[in-house]
Image (cartoon, helix red, strand yellow):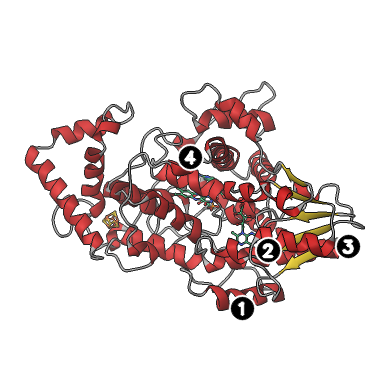
Amino acid sequence: MGALRLILADQLSESIAALQGLDKAQDTVMLCEVMEEASYVPHHPKKIAFLFSAMRHFAAELEAQGVRVRYVTLNDAENTGSFTSEAERAVKALGVSRLIVTEPGEYRVREMIKNWAATLGIPVEILPDTRFLATHEEFAAWAKGKKQLRMEFFYREMRKKYAILMEPDNKPTGGEWNYDKENRKPPKAGMASPPRMAHKKSAITKDVLALVKERFSHHFGTLEPFHYAVTRRQALLELDHFIRRLLPEFGDYQDAMVAGEPYLYHSLISSYLNAGLLLPLEICQKAEAAYRAGTVPLNAAEGFIRQILGWREYIRGIYWHFMPEYGQRNSLNATRPLPDFYWGAPTGMFCVAETVRHTRDHAYSHHIQRLMITGNFALLAGLDVTAVQEWYLAVYSDAYEWVEMPNTLGMALFGDGGVVASKPYAASGKYIHRMSNYCEKCTYDPDVMTGENACPFNALYWDFLVRHEDKFRGNQRMPYMFSTWDRFAPEKQQAIRVHAATTFKKMAEGAL
Ligand code: FAD
Ligand code: DLZ
Ligand code: SF4
């Protein structure tokens, strides 16, 4: 009797642990489209279409290699709707001796699968996900005894482990570990990013688009046009296009935001990487090779590699190190309901409306939009951390809890009490004005603090600091903010707080 090898939608790599040692004569590989996963949050239709199409293409590639595949489509009349019930059905139908699965990316799913040995009555092997570059044990060993878990120091360990941008004397290439100070320029006037790739839709993709249109049109987000890569070959083309055409400018304009330009110089690879179509090490090695070949400057190559070898692995480490307790945290007691403008209702705040538009149309917005627009607003306004996390998990095509949660709860909302961020990423309209051209198009004025046309971010920023003074006044990275507040005349302080209260009222009335 063979094994049942289960592959989840974000495990679409031929090198995935669950496919190693596959016996083509005996084993069956199973993939299933299940309603429970497609609807535990209202995923963006593009995200569902991307995953289903990528799953179907992956299954077809395995079949072409002579692998026996059990593929359950969402519309299959026999489909029972969940991973657990589909595993039960397959075990009964196939009479397999064991089930093999790679560790899921989400705690919720891992807990579910841990019960399967008992319910299925066969051994269930949960194998480590070796696509990631740090194991849970390595992260725990690094974190042990440290008061602060700073990404920068973890990143240096990863650079050494994988010999990425390292010199033979074990020193970092160029002499510095981090070239961030050479990055993060504001946008240039008239800046637009080079064209992006659009992939021809296969018959599989067309079928999936019809299915998603029929079943998920009520979810937030536009399904078409749909240009996503859905195979590894296409994802590699995207990666090469990025490295050749966009990476040279990536570092400089990583934080810039431009109206009508959702992508700028970002790579757009997160959905492919998180689903398994690309692998993290190959991406870092390609970026390093481009630097060594002289086609990409060091600040760009290092800045990009840091996102993947550093941030991505660190974020995953934080998730598994602190779960499940991490998911319960709400250190700033943020409970205000999520305003409808997160789901596309009109708002006069151009920056928020534009970020939500990009999100709606592409299931994508870049890091600074996520952090400093929708994230910053949620932080300043004290929006409910669970509702905000559900929003991020639903609306982005790259979102899985292991990566969404520490970024949202930790980095954007400071809801983990300062594990990921040593101070909150709180900013007023001044920051957004400097890093974007959004304010030029806005009904509000970033230079005004109170009154009808005042940028809401301004009063909310100071109100946030004062509301959480007990937590932040002693923060060594924030003395400048409090000394500025202290210098404001009492009348000005009062007016700001009154304006913040008016802003909250307008928000509750849907009039912001
Ligand atoms: P680029 O800017 O081109 O960066 C290259 C790659 O680096 C990304 O593809 C990604 O794999 C990695 N990376 C960069 N920053 C991070 C980070 N902070 N955490 C993990 N990986 C990183 N990323 C997700 O993949 N899924 C999410 O659900 C997600 N949710 C986020 C929520 C919030 C509130 C914030 C602030 C960030 C979130 N991020 C998430 C991180 C980051 O915004 C996205 O990885 C990035 O925008 C993806 O676009 P890109 O591929 O063009 O990235
Ligand atoms: C996100 C998602 C969606 C929308 N649908 C499926 C699905 O039908 N089948 C599947 O195998 N996986 C899906 N996923 C991804 C799972 O939710 C994902 O494997 C977990 O989030 C990671 O533990
Ligand atoms: Fe956003 Fe304020 Fe600028 Fe308007 S003025 S775009 S609300 S930062």
Disc marking residue 66? 3
- Report the mark closest to the observer, 4 or 3: 4
* Alpha-carbon span between mark 4 and mark 2: 31 Å
Q: Is residue 228 visible?
A: no
**For the residue marked with disc 4, what is the amino acid?**
Tyr
Q: Secondary structure at mark 3?
A: loop
- Compute the Cα span from label 4 to label 1: 38 Å
Residue that mark 2 sits on: 54
Query: Height in image: 502 above or below 214?
Result: above
Q: Position of residue 72 (x, y in %)?
A: 72, 68
Q: Earlier in the sequence, mark 4 or mark 3?
A: 3
Which amino acid lies under the numbered mark 2 shown in the image of this protein? Ala
Q: Earlier in the sequence, mark 2 or mark 1?
A: 2
Q: Which mark is residue 326?
A: 4
How many angstroms separate mark 2 from mark 3 (CA)? Answer: 19 Å
On the image, the x and y values in percent for residue 298 come to 57, 37
Amino acid carrying label 3: it is Gly
Q: Nearer the viewer, residue 465 or 254?
A: 465
> Callout 1: few (<14), some (14-19), or many (20+) C-alpha neighbours within 10 Å?
few
Query: Where's residue 450, x and y in %?
Result: 15, 52
Instruction: Please state which of residues 252 and 155 is positioned toward the viewer in this rendering.
Output: 155
Disc 4 is placed on an element classified as helix
User: Which of the two residues, 157 or 102, is positioned nearer the viewer here?
Assistant: 102
- Whole-number angstrom distance, CA of label 4 to CA of label 3: 43 Å
Query: Pointers 4 and 3 in contact (CB under 8 A)?
Result: no
- Which quadrant would the C terminus be assigned to in this image? bottom left
Q: CA distance from mark 3 to mark 1?
A: 29 Å
